[in-house]
Image (spheres, grey):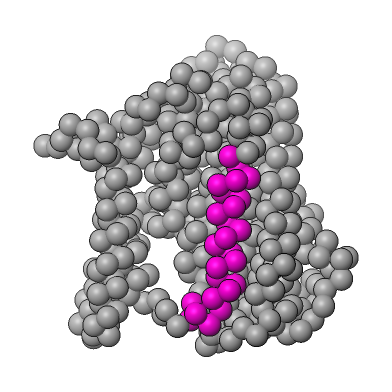
């Protein structure tokens, strides 16, 4: 996919992934000698990988704030905000409901937990699921600066929306402030493009660490669980979302997936919907053609409250753990799992491994042993990366559906293969 003298960013990331995987695998074949552990895994690779993740995270708060103020200050019709919000939250809940139902059905049909061998227990952290009442209270920032300092997404979204609306209501003064935010938005997008140039190196390092430190025998021990989670994740991403896009938007789902590939690759390498946010937002706006008005609101919201991939893992894991301990769950308990998983995905941030930590809360709620988490902890990393891809794809799918229903999807941009290529680094000529 070379064009001119440059490979596109996604191609460079793919190459980095494959070479990183091979490099890590060779190191693990060599038995991870001490020099590689010290100098590469805990040295260069760790530094490059962490620097890359920090660079992405560095963009999240300013990007969400500025982009959302821009989006909400350009809403000509304030009622649109309520409509968009309602449709978005509704669709997020429905898709997460479908995800966890699919996962539980698969777990009941394929019985992955019967006769499974546990992997070595790893120390687990148990977290409480934040109750919905608290999520609502926490949504209003008593101090917006503190919310930004802690990167708490829901209060930032709330504050930015109100600020944007006040700008619209402030007449001539508001127009001047809005113009500043629009300029700033352009500047931050440039910053995203700059950071993306570093992505292939970061991805190489992260994947090399993963390949060098993963243990194949762990995967075999809970193989059926791993295969089932992968299977349901693929069905959700390649059947459920495409069907929704084709039915509700009447657009080609394959073109959509093709245009979202940079965000998907980022999600896979970082295992964090939050860290991927800048790339998701840019892809949805510039490649897919969703307006900033819709995307600036729905994408950050989705990164926080919509986690279909995580719901799938939790559904399969609950079935797996129940079967492993020989505990029969009643229909009411299954329904409880569905509800708990939906709540859990609302109340958590999209950061690595959070889904696993929350699983403890779900298990406790239906009376399953929390120690069951130790069974699957060892294999969670690869699953975490894959379910983050589904989380990000879900946010983008719902965003596109909502935008289409509001007349905020530019079909010309969507159909143009080249649209938005420059943000993927295409127009950055060598030298
Ligand atoms: N890593 C996932 C995300 O950021 C959350 C999880 O399932 O752990 O979307």
Question: Which residue occupies the foreground of this view, 327 or 90?
Answer: 327
In magenta, the rendered stretch is 218-242
Q: Quadrant of the N terminus?
A: top left
Q: Is residue 146 left or right of residue 366?
A: left
Residue 5, quarter of picture: top left
Residue 424, quarter of picture: top left
Q: Is residue 230 magenta?
A: yes
Residue 23 x %, y %: 25, 68
Q: Quadrant of the C terminus?
A: top left
Residue 110 x %, y %: 68, 70
Question: Which residue occupies the foreground of this view, 184 or 20?
Answer: 20
Q: Is residue 315 left or right of residue 36?
A: right
Tally the numbered discs. 0
Residue 93 x %, y %: 72, 46
Residue 164 x %, y %: 59, 27
Q: Is residue 7 visible?
A: yes
């Amino acid at each position: 996919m070379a064009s001119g003298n440059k490979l596109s960013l996604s191609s460079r990331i793919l190459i980095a992934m494959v070479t990183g995987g091979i490099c890590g695998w060779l190191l693990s074949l060599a038995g991870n000698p001490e020099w590689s552990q010290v100098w590469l895994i805990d040295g260069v690779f760790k530094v490059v990988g962490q620097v890359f993740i920090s660079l992405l995270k560095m963009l999240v708060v300013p990007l969400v704030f500025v982009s959302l103020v821009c989006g909400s200050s350009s809403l000509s019709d304030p009622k649109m905000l309520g409509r968009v919000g309602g449709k978005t939250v509704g669709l997020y809940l429905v898709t997460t409901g479908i995800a966890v139902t699919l996962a539980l059905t698969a777990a009941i049909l394929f019985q992955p937990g019967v006769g499974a061998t546990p992997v070595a227990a790893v120390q687990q952290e148990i977290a409480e699921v934040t109750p919905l009442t608290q999520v609502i209270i926490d949504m209003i920032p008593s101090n917006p600066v503190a919310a930004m300092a802690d990167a708490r997404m829901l209060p930032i979204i709330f504050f930015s929306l109100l600020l944007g609306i006040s700008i619209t209501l402030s007449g001539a003064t508001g127009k001047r402030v809005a113009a500043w935010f629009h300029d700033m938005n352009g500047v931050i997008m440039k910053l995203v493009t700059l950071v993306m140039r570093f992505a292939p190196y970061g991805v190489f390092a992260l994947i090399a660490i993963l390949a060098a430190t993963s243990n194949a025998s762990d995967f075999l021990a809970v193989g059926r669980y791993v295969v089932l989670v992968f299977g349901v994740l693929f069905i959700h991403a390649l059947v459920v979302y495409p069907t929704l896009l084709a039915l509700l938007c009447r657009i080609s789902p394959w073109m959509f997936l093709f245009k979202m590939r940079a965000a998907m690759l980022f999600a896979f390498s970082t295992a964090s919907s939050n860290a991927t946010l800048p790339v998701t937002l840019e892809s949805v706006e510039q490649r897919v053609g969703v307006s900033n008005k819709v995307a600036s609101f729905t994408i950050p919201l989705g990164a926080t409250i919509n986690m279909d991939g995580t719901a799938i893992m939790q559904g399969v894991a609950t079935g797996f753990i129940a079967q492993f301990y020989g505990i029969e769950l009643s229909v009411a308990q299954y329904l409880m799992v569905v509800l708990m998983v939906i709540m859990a995905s609302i109340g958590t941030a999209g950061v690595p491994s959070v889904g696993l930590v929350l699983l403890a809360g779900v298990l406790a709620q239906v009376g399953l042993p929390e120690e069951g988490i130790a069974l699957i902890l060892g294999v969670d990393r690869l699953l975490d990366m894959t379910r983050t891809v589904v989380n990000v794809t879900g946010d983008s799918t719902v965003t596109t559906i909502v935008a289409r229903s509001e007349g905020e999807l530019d079909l010309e941009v969507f159909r143009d293969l080249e649209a938005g290529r420059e943000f993927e680094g295409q127009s950055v000529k060598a030298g």
